[in-house]
Image: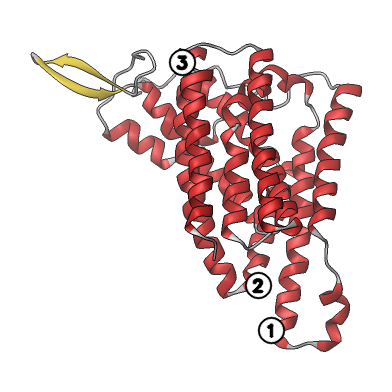
Amino acid sequence: MHTLALWGGIFAFIAALLLIDLGVFNKRDHVPSLKEATLYSLFYIAASCFFGLFVYWYMGDTAGLQFFTGFLIEKSMSVDNLMMFIVIFTYFQVPAQYHHRVLFWGVVGAIVLRLVLIYLGAKLVAAFHPLLLVFAALLLFASYKIFFMDDEDGDEYQENAVVKWFAKYTPMTDKFDGHNFTTRVLEGGKSIVKFTPLALVLVAVETTDLMFATDSIPAIFSVSSDPFILFSSNVCAILGLRALFFVVEHVLNKLCYLKKALGLVLAFVGFKMVLEGLNSIFELLHWQSASYWTSFHISTGASLLVIAGILTAAVVASLLFPKAGKPGDESGASKSPDSEH
């Protein structure tokens, strides 16, 4: 168990970065340039590395490597998530200067979601370690989908039951009111509060993040079973998502191999978790004859190098051997919102 001071430290770190984001980087609604977004993204990466070095110093080299590996896994998983956010913003025709507003509160919701899922996952894995095989199956299936299934119709979030329910059963206007999620309108001589389309966009972003968490949360359990390491590395990765979104939006057409690299990362992490899950089963059954399997282990340091190598190779290959067309460019992304919105 970690001290309350350590947990208080990560929550203070989160609060400080959120306040800097609102009070310094985004005091007004605007569309960041590529240079501005890149600098912001580098700031968040530097802040996360600083926290990782603190973990390395305070908790030891093993914890430090686990933090950076978890950070890199979540950061790579988030790229696919950001591509879907671009589709959502395009579909609902959200003015570019309001993207940050939605992403900011989307990240706050994601932090709460990660805290709950990681806590529950850690409890379950601690109670029954072979559960890692279930997580591995989810990751391997996600990798299979990336390589062999066409999931680029760009409209999967439209089938989201939460988004449909919200649009149908909550009082909504069909016009944006600046960056506000609610607005007042006159109906029957009375002023009433209604949700704006921006609120529906936030619901779509939050529920999309929940769907993507089924990949990213199981993946980080291949790194460690320590809830603090898992949560801190995960949160440090998603805190910089707002800045990374605007970078990805600018350079998406150049990173043509990044999605396939994500598939390789998922396959590698899934394979690592299969080994760990099998090791747990052999230990539970006391199968001494399976000593070959129980002795086979992919270290955290090796995992960090492999994942970093895959992502670096994808970026370099994308720059050296570009493909025609825009990866993740959905043909139906420019639709207008439904009339019920």
* Amino acid type of the residue tagged 2 in the rendering: Pro
Ranked by sequence position, the earlier of labels 2 and 1 is: 2
Vertical placement of residue 140 versus 253, above or below? below
* Amino acid type of the residue tagged 1 in the rendering: Leu
Residue at point 33%, 14% (across, down): 177
CB under 8 Å between callouts 2 and 1?
A: yes
Residue, disc 1:
284
Q: CA distance from mark 1 to mark 3?
A: 56 Å
Residue, disc 2:
130
Ranked by sequence position, the earlier of labels 1 and 3 is: 3
From the viewer's perspective, tell me whether residue 139 is left or right of residue 172: right
| Residue 38 x %, y % | 68, 20
Residue at point 45%, 23% (across, down): 101
For the residues carrying marks 2 and 3, which lies nearer the camera in this image?
3
Residue, disc 3:
27
Q: CA distance from mark 2 to mark 3?
A: 48 Å
* Amino acid type of the residue tagged 3 in the rendering: Lys
Mark 1 Cα shell of 10 Å, populated few (<14), some (14-19), many (≥20): few
Residue at point 75%, 81% (across, down): 282
